[in-house]
Amino acid sequence: MQLNAAQFGVWYGQRLDPDNPVFNQGGYMELRGPIDIGILKATLELMVAEDESLRLRFAEVEGVPAQHFGPAPDFAVDVVDVSRESDPLAVALEQMRADMAVVPDLERDRLFTHVLFVLGPEHLIWYNRAHHLIHDGHTSAILRRRAAEIYAELAERGEVAGPVFGSFARVLEEQAAYQGSAAQRRDASYWRKVMDGATCPANAGAPSNRVVREISYLDNHVLVQLREFSERAGVSWQQALIAAAVIHRYVWTGERDVLLSLPVSGRVSPAAQGVPGMMANVLPLRCGVDVGETCEALAARVAAQTLRAQWHQRYDSTDLLRDLGWPANGRRLFGPVINIFGDEPPTFAGTPMSMHLFSTGGTAEDLSLTVTRSAGDRLRVDVTIDAAYADTVDLGRYLGSFHRVVDSMTARAGVAVAAVDVLGADRGLVVEGWNATVVDVVDGSLGELFEARVAAVPDAVALVF
């Protein structure tokens, strides 16, 4: 079978940089409470057996990759007890990060793993890693929910009703049928209209495919404001954060025609929603900014645009770039990425789980803002960029200004876009400190002063441009 469009991009990306672990996606789920390790181990092994995408085998013949379904993987979950270590979490983290740094052979190695770490009484970690060739971010959410369901059934009845995942083979057939179809032509027409007159981002040069990252968390009072804002605007908190990214991009660049990159699951039919596999796509979010508009009104417009994008999300970004005549190499997608994982972590027979992300399994050619739910229902905000471009932006300041946009736009009802404050504590420095430029100078014209410096230090640099 041929790879789908999403898989092709990952395959060739890994082939071009075979030692780079950037396509490993993974993280860990922390469980604090009464958990039966044996049942959890059996849960994960049953889930692996249900996941058809884990049966995929890959091969390349004369430079062309192909895939086929093999037997279910013979897989047993490792249980690693680190509870006697002086710092069990640090030991577990070291082992997990070491595993994330290993690049599997796409044609010979198993492309996933699950490991259980025992940190102490009623304190467990479920670590999972999968190559982006077989799984995407939507799949991770599917697996978390399914694991919670299987665990609850095993704990209550000792057996599982049966597999619930849809068929990835069926999805691949649907994707093949989409090529050249009327649906694809409608999607192409929609995206060409959306992107009519858009400016192509500057060529970014060759990426290193090494990610530089800054991590932060939204303050608790901002979380409260965000939910209240969402209710006023009639949008979800995820859509409100996408609107914040639009406003942030406007205030960062001054451009009112904001263009962002929006990751989507690539799943349109209801049957495909619950299917593990790699189907993710990245499409443009283009939004004109009216500075007199309230942030609530802008959020409602952004929400409508993101919903319309969902109906046309199967149109591959590579095809769209070709339609636009934009280069596919050295590009920065359509603009900075805004990626929100908003699913609520499930409970395991009443025991809560908190999520900790290592990597979403992709490159960060342009700036990427990723929001995930973390422990205690907190929202973690990561900003990443390819290491080759790390000197083009101060990630700490970029992240800090995003936090201030979210705080300012949600602080009260009816804040106009033009009134969003991005300076915060820096306002005194920018408005007063940097403008305190009065200095005493000696008498004489500017020309005379310059000539005096020439005489004093004739070999000094006069001008840098």
Image (cartoon, rainbow, N blue to C red):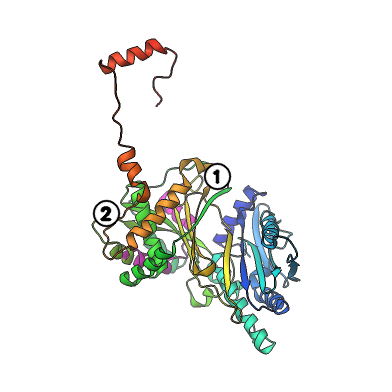
The kind of residue on which mark 2 rests is: Ala
Q: Is residue 315 magenta?
A: yes
Residue at image mark 2? 418
**Label 1 element class:** helix
Looking at the picture, does residue 359 appear above or below residue 373?
above
Does the image show residue 45? Answer: yes
Q: Quadrant of the C terminus?
A: top left
- Measured as percent of width and height from the top left, residue 20 is found at 64, 50
Q: Are marks 1 and 2 in contact (CB under 8 Å)?
A: no
Which residue bears the numbered disc 1?
A: 387
* Predominant SS along the magenta part: helix
Q: Describe the element under mark 2 as helix, strand or loop.
A: helix
Q: Is residue 166 visible?
A: no
Instruction: Decide: few, some or many residues near mark 2? Use Cα within 10 Å; few <14, some 14-19, many ≥20.
Output: some
Q: How many marks?
A: 2
Query: Which residue is rendered at x = 66% and y = 66% of the image?
Result: 127
Q: Earlier in the sequence, mark 1 or mark 2?
A: 1
Report the magenta residues as a range.
Answer: 301-327
Which image quadrant for residue 248? bottom left
Q: Is residue 44 magenta?
A: no
Q: Amino acid at mark 1?
A: Ala
Query: From this viewpoint, which residue is outermost toward the top?
Result: 455
Residue lying at the far bottom in this picture: please name it: 157
Quarter placement of the N terminus: bottom right
Q: Judge from the rendering whether residue 159 lies leftward or rightward of residue 366; answer left or right.
A: right
Quarter of the rendering containing residue 70: bottom right
Decide which of 204, 122 is in the foreground and name it. 122
